[in-house]
Amino acid sequence: MTVKDEVDNLADCLMDIVDLFAQVVIIDTGSTDGTRELLRDRLGIEPLFMPLDPNDCCALSSPRNLGFERLATPWLMTLDADERLDRAELEAVIALDDSDLPAGIIFAWDTEFGPDRIVEDYKLILFRQHHRHRGLVHDTAQPSLRETGESACWSSLLRIRHYPSLPGIRQKDDWYAWRLDCARRREPDWLRYHWFSGYMAYRLGRIAEAEALMRTVHEGRPALFPTESLNASMILASIHAARGQRAETQAVVENARQYHRQVADDFEMRVNFRLKPWLESAADNAARGSLDAITPYLFPY
């Protein structure tokens, strides 16, 4: 785990499950709220300290990978302080025969923005020891798996419950916007940053900015990020549809459907339960001229 000022979260996150892990490494990036003391006094964990580097876009992958290097276990799990795992579900995952497993496991990831607003998604949080996180922002192990030709599978045994801090969401947006701008300058070919920047712009109503970023990812079709590429196609098609641009909408959707068929065997595409139904529905609505029905589904960020 990487943490900063998580004194209100850590006990609920770890207290019920911490004994199930062979090793726990937590890197604190600069807490001032008693996080380090809580880890020592209540959980018996001595955190490492590694401040985030502004010259590295305050990348969390650097401290996270430092933590992975300290682990000698055959599997690695990464967890955020605002996430919760059920003990019995985690025990079921631990009991799996890992000789039958690929290099990673993807689980359901439910983000609660309120009692009546839960966004369903998925997340790769468990993978074999030789993999590391990649990316300056929204780092993940998925590029590592793709680069080695390995894969991840879906498991219904465990569901990650995510409870983001809603009062601090505007401040978090500003923070991520700065980091994403930094990352796009540092690694302009890592088009995953463009997807996240574009979706943030779309969510905040900056449509022209969103369109430009989404078009870059849609047209670029980055091999390491097929899902983000198709997500960008969805937003781009929705922008055209909102303007009443039927031909442009159909062109984007048809291009995306063709690309989806090309990458259908990718491990993430096999577990993505939302993309293909959305593309089929969008194609049908565009053909019938029902452009107002073409809207993107929500993402948990």
Image (tube, helix red, strand yellow):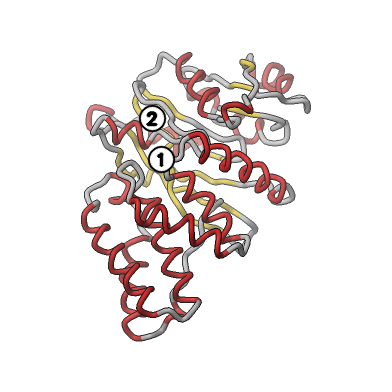
Q: Distance between the residues labelled 2 and 1?
A: 37 Å
Q: How many circles with numbers are drawn on the protein? A: 2
Label at residue 53: none
Neighbour tally class for label 1: few under 14, some 14-19, many 20 plus, Cα within 10 Å: few
Residue sitting at x 57%, y 37%:
182
Callout 2: SS: helix
Please state the horizontal and vertical placement of residue 100, each as a whole percent of the image.
Answer: 22, 32
User: In front: 7, or 138?
Assistant: 138
Kind of residue at badge 2: Ile
Q: Quadrant of residue 208?
A: bottom right
Residue sitting at x 26%, y 29%:
148
Please state the horizontal and vertical placement of residue 255, each as a whole percent of the image.
Answer: 28, 64
**Left or right: where does residue 147 sit relative to residue 47?**
left
Label at residue 189: 1
Are circles 2 and 1 on residues that touch, CB within 8 Å? Answer: no
Q: In the picture shown, does residue 246 fall above or below 262? A: below
Please state the horizontal and vertical placement of residue 130, each as a whole percent of the image.
Answer: 34, 21
**Left or right: where does residue 90 sit relative to residue 131?**
right
Residue sitting at x 53%, y 59%:
210
Q: In which quarter of the image is the N terminus?
A: top right
Q: Give the mark, 2 or 1, whose residue is nearer the N terminus.
A: 2
Please state the horizontal and vertical placement of residue 20, each as a whole percent of the image.
Answer: 48, 25
Neighbour tally class for label 2: few under 14, some 14-19, many 20 plus, Cα within 10 Å: few
Q: Quadrant of residue 158?
A: top left
Kind of residue at badge 1: Asp
Callout 1: SS: loop
Q: Which of marks 2 and 1 is in front?
A: 1
Q: Which residue bears the numbered disc 2?
A: 94
- Which residue ends up furthest to the right in the rendered image? 33
User: In front: 22, or 184?
Assistant: 184
Residue sitting at x 60%, y 62%:
206
Q: In the picture shown, does residue 192 fall above or below 28? A: below
